[in-house]
Image: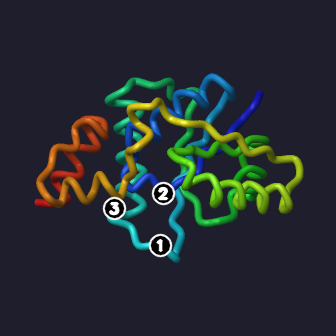
Amino acid sequence: MRTGIYPGTFDPITLGHIDVIKKSLKIVDKLVIAITDNVNKEYFFSLEDRVSIVNKSLFKDLKLNKKKILIKSFNTLTIDLCKKYKASIIIRGLRAVSDFEYEFQLAGMNKKLNNDIETIFLMSNIENQIISSNFVKEIAKLNGNVNKFLTKSAVKILKDKLK
């Protein structure tokens, strides 16, 4: 069985992330969506809220297969998470060329740390490539419509948080 890890902050999960998840499920038998709680970053949503939003978005809104997806939080190196879940693939999403340099360096560092782990870059569908969690939060804070960027559950939770 081929297992992949899709690490990220998912603050909140967007339709761009979901495109990458759906494409990943065509490549791996099991996908661990790993939600990081990096102490060097400030988050809009708590770790518990981000895990809940991902769960609701994937399983309630989209009805994705729970047998193929595991949602976990983590605060370790991604390669240590790979070891824990016997994953041989790290999935990373790319939106634009500007993402590539950072992602390329990150993949190289992970490869140096564990030569058995491969990083695969996937792009979301063209209509979702411009979506970023930061832009979505900014639009929502300014009372803009974020329905085209998030699932129904994520939209509701984001709006509730801003009340």
Q: Tag on residue 9?
A: 2
Relative to the observer, which residue lies in front, 103 or 20?
103
Instruction: Give the CA distance from mark 3 to mark 2.
Output: 10 Å
Circle 2 Cα neighbour tier, 10 Å, few/some/many (<14 / 14–19 / ≥20) = some
Q: Left of 65 or right of it: where is 43? A: left
| Disc 3 to disc 2: CB gap under 8 Å | no
Amino acid of disc 1 = Lys
Quickly name the residue at label 3. 45
State the image quarter where residue 99 is shown.
bottom right
Instruction: Give the CA distance from mark 1 to mark 2.
Output: 9 Å
Q: Is residue 153 above or below residue 103?
A: above
State the image quarter where residue 103 is shown.
bottom right
- State which tag comes first along the sequence, 1 or 2: 2
Q: Which color mode does the image show?
A: rainbow
Q: Left of 49 or right of it: where is 103? A: right
- Mark 3: secondary structure: loop
Amino acid of disc 2 = Thr
| Disc 1 to disc 2: CB gap under 8 Å | yes
Q: Quadrant where the C terminus lies?
A: bottom left
Query: Which dot, 3 or 1, sits closer to the camera?
Result: 1
Q: x, y (%) of residue 86?
A: 77, 43
Q: x, y (%) of residue 61?
A: 32, 29
- State which tag comes first along the sequence, 3 or 2: 2
Residue in the picture at 68% in, 26% down = 27
Quickly name the residue at label 1. 41
Residue in the picture at 75% in, 56% down = 79
